[in-house]
Image (spheres, rainbow, N blue to C red):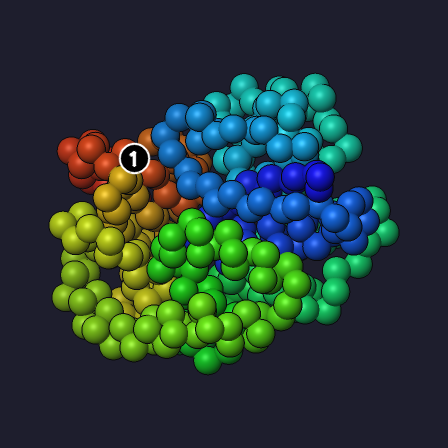
């Protein structure tokens, strides 16, 4: 019987899925070519996101997602400054410092951090198709695009797949996607019969999405607010928000699915205004987390009142 490796990854995220694909390829190449990889998409929540998630495989890895102190989580890679929640978990990390745990909050992407760590520690070099995906993860996760237009473009396979992932595919979709990407290029994955029609649909929806976002935006000082709590399944505009409201210093968005509610907060990467808030730290004070320039708070589906109050407080803090 093949050994089983579970890889927990940040779901609906280009960096999270690339990180998981990269680690799966490494594991097969270096440690166990017959291993059965089971990717598991993870979403943030207020409280322990690993609560109720079984660590029942032969080996476990967590990539681009919060630190899990369970000793069975042998591998851990993350670059979110808010990786330790509650903050006491940092002490567990510092005290044990496993050689298979990696944390670098300066890394533009977790995929880049993994590629460097595996090359240094295991002399493993990712195949070219994954190196390409890692470069894109650096660009996308750190918003290193020259303009909002470039950030929302849907021309290249990486851009199309990133938009599709952000659309909130079902976990089954992203788990299969991780397996495909561990074995083939972004262009090949984008051409798959299971994926290509969905990418076309994302593109086809773009025009109506732009219209919807234009009408949704409400200014509160230099913050643009998108309240989509009323439309279950509607998405955060992401970089489209800055394309349509280029003067915004910050964007705050409320979205909900059937089971969860999310408030997303971002700094416009394309204004020359100095940044006055650490968004990840701000969101962490409301039970969420993230990076210096982008973060969020995820609540349960039945906490709409709390979500509205949280959104209002976050907007107020950004004004201060
Ligand atoms: Mn990331």
Q: Pick the quarter of the image with the C terminus.
A: top left
Question: Depth check: 196 or 237 in front?
Answer: 196
Residue at x 75% of width, y 60% of height? 126
Which of the 4 image quadrants contains residue 301? top left
Residue 48 to residue 313: above or below: above
Q: Which residue is mark 1?
A: 299
Look at 58% across and 66% down and name the residue there.
136
In the picture shown, does residue 309 fall above or below 242?
above
State which quadrant residue 298 falls in: top left
Q: Residues within 10 Å of mark 1 (few under 14, many from 20)?
A: many
On the rendered structure, is 26 left or right of 161?
A: right
Q: Label 1 CB, ligand 1: below 8 Å?
A: no
**Residue 301 visible to the viewer:** yes
Comparing 280 with 177, the one in front is: 177
Frontmost residue, 190 versus 240: 190
Q: What is the x, y in percent for residue 238?
A: 35, 60
Residue 307 image point, x, y percent? 22, 37
In the rendered image, the residue lying farthest to the right is 123
Q: Residue furthest bottom?
A: 155
Q: Residue at x 36, y 30 (%)?
A: 46
Circle 1: element type:
strand
Please indicate, yes or no, whether residue 103 appears anywhere in the rendered image. Answer: no
Q: Quadrant of the N terminus?
A: top right
């Amino acid at each position: 019987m093949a050994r089983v490796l579970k890889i927990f990854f940040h779901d609906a995220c280009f960096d999270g899925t690339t990180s998981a694909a990269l680690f799966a390829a490494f594991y097969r190449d270096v440690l166990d070519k017959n291993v059965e990889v089971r990717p598991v998409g993870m979403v943030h929540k207020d409280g322990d996101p690993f609560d109720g998630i079984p660590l029942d495989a032969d080996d476990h890895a967590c990539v681009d997602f919060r630190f899990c102190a369970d000793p069975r989580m042998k591998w851990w890679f993350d670059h979110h400054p808010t990786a330790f929640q509650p903050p006491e978990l940092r002490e567990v990390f510092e005290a044990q410092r496993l050689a298979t745990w990696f944390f670098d909050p300066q890394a533009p992407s977790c995929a880049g951090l993994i590629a460097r760590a595996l090359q240094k520690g295991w002399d493993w070099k990712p195949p070219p198709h994954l190196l390409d995906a890692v470069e894109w993860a650096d660009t996308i996760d750190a918003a290193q695009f020259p303009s909002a237009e470039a950030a929302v473009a849907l021309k290249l396979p990486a851009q199309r797949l990133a938009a599709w992932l952000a659309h909130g595919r079902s976990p089954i979709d992203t788990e299969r996607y991780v397996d495909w990407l561990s074995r083939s290029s972004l262009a090949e994955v984008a051409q798959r019969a299971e994926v290509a029609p969905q990418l076309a649909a994302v593109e086809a929806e773009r025009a109506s999405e732009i219209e919807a976002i234009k009408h949704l935006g409400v200014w509160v000082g230099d913050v643009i607010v998108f309240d989509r709590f009323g439309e279950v399944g509607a998405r955060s505009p992401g970089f489209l928000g800055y394309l349509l409201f280029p003067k915004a210093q910050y964007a705050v968005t409320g979205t909900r699915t059937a089971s969860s509610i999310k408030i997303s907060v971002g700094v416009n990467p394309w204004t020359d205004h100095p940044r006055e808030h650490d968004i990840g730290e701000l969101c962490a004070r409301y039970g969420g987390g993230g990076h210096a320039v982008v973060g969020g708070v995820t609540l349960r589906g039945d906490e709409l009142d709390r979500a509205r109050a949280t959104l209002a407080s976050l907007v107020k803090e950004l004004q201060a």
